[in-house]
Image: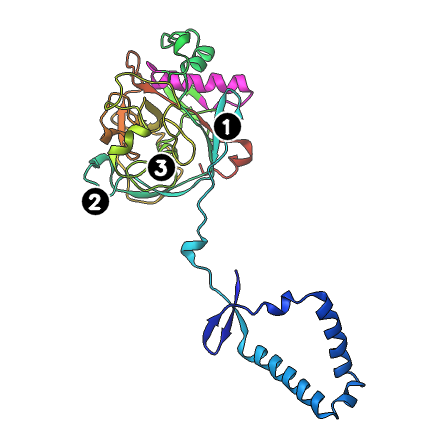
Amino acid sequence: MKPRLLHQGRLQQPLRWLDRLPLSVVIPAGIVLGCGVGGAGFYYLEAPGWAVAWLALFAALGWLGYTATPVFDEPNPAQATVKPAKPRPVRDGSLLMVDLPGDRFLMGSPDSDDLARNNEKPRHEVTVSPFRIAITPVTVELYRRIMPESSAAQSEAEGRLPVTDVTWFDAVEFCNRLSARAGYRPCYSQQSDQWRCDWRADGYRLPTEAEWEYACRAGTTTRYSFGDDPANLGGYAWYSGNTKTAQAVATKRANPWGLYDLHGNVWEWCWDWYGAYSPKSVRNPHESKQSTSGWRVLRGGSFDRPPEDLRSAGRFNDVPGSGFGDWTYGFRCVRVPPQQIDRLSD
């Protein structure tokens, strides 16, 4: 916060010329001033010339003290807001990930968006805790290493493609195996026909639907992470307007947080059961109770979908066993490092 001087009701810049005087001037002036105000100085005051000089000096100092009162600007809230820096990728086992700080954001679409669908409403406030997310969907190459027996695996020549032809169950099993290989505690366990997530485990898992949208938006409130205009989509996404098949990951521009392919390329499985939104503000929502529909959430759109399906708020769903034989279903991983586990809310 920079000081300014209040001079007769007008704001002026500080007078800095005194600060710029050289030492060769300042030191002799200090000696003379010391003598002048000391006991010997009173002798000089008897001379008319010295008296006038000292009166002029005191008058100048008095003017500076009276009319040049330093004040401090009040901070401007709009200027004080600092945009979060783009997070740096970190190597986490076999994945390249970024740490997201967690925050409040508006999830869903506003009524004013003529492309919005009813299942994206009402728009509501959500708070998510810090988490770490992979910068790309899981690739064929990594999936083949962890799940070599899977029929979803494609040729090695296609290693940089996002893996497809995977069910929600395949994605969950992959997360557990990758966690074990990295020495982390797996998040998922199966009881009867139900899958449970241990939210305090430090292993890899699927993002919740709220985490996925928070990461996709990257602090934006527009239709896409780059703005509202679908005409710009081709620079950021693979979709029906520029391809007929999935493409290698990270070949389009990233969102403001350095995440690739959240718009398009392949649909991405999320943890949550699919359900209607509540208008209430919520913290770390993760729909773990099976919905009557029996569907799990998919997000992001895919290479065979039109622009409106690739919006940040766009939602899709399917039964968790679906995906085998579907070349548009993929996923990416998240995890919560141990130092952040205590900040979670169950």
Q: Which picture quadrant has residue 242? A: top left
Between 91 and 119, which is closer to the camera in this rendering? 91
Amino acid of disc 1: Ala
Q: Which picture quadrant has residue 64? A: bottom right
- The quarter in which the C terminus is drawn is top left
Percent position (x, y) of residue 244? 25, 17
| Stretch in magenta | 164-188
Is residue 226 in view?
Answer: yes
* Up/down of 34 relative to 134, above or below: below
| Residue of label 3 | 217
Percent position (x, y) of residue 27? 74, 70
Percent position (x, y) of residue 181? 53, 16
Amino acid of disc 3: Arg
Q: Main secondary structure of the magenta part?
A: helix
| Residue of label 2 | 112
Is residue 168 found inside the magenta-colored segment of the image?
yes
* Up/down of 164 relative to 116, above or below: above
Q: Which element type, helix, strand or loop, lies under badge 3?
A: helix
Q: Which element type, helix, strand or loop, lies under badge 2?
A: loop
Give the residue displayed 24% in from the left and 20% down from the top.
304
Percent position (x, y) of residue 60? 60, 81
Give the residue displayed 46% in from the left and 43% down from the top.
84
First of labels 3, 1 by sequence position:
1
Q: What whole-number distance in Å separates the C-alpha atoms at marks 3 and 1?
A: 26 Å
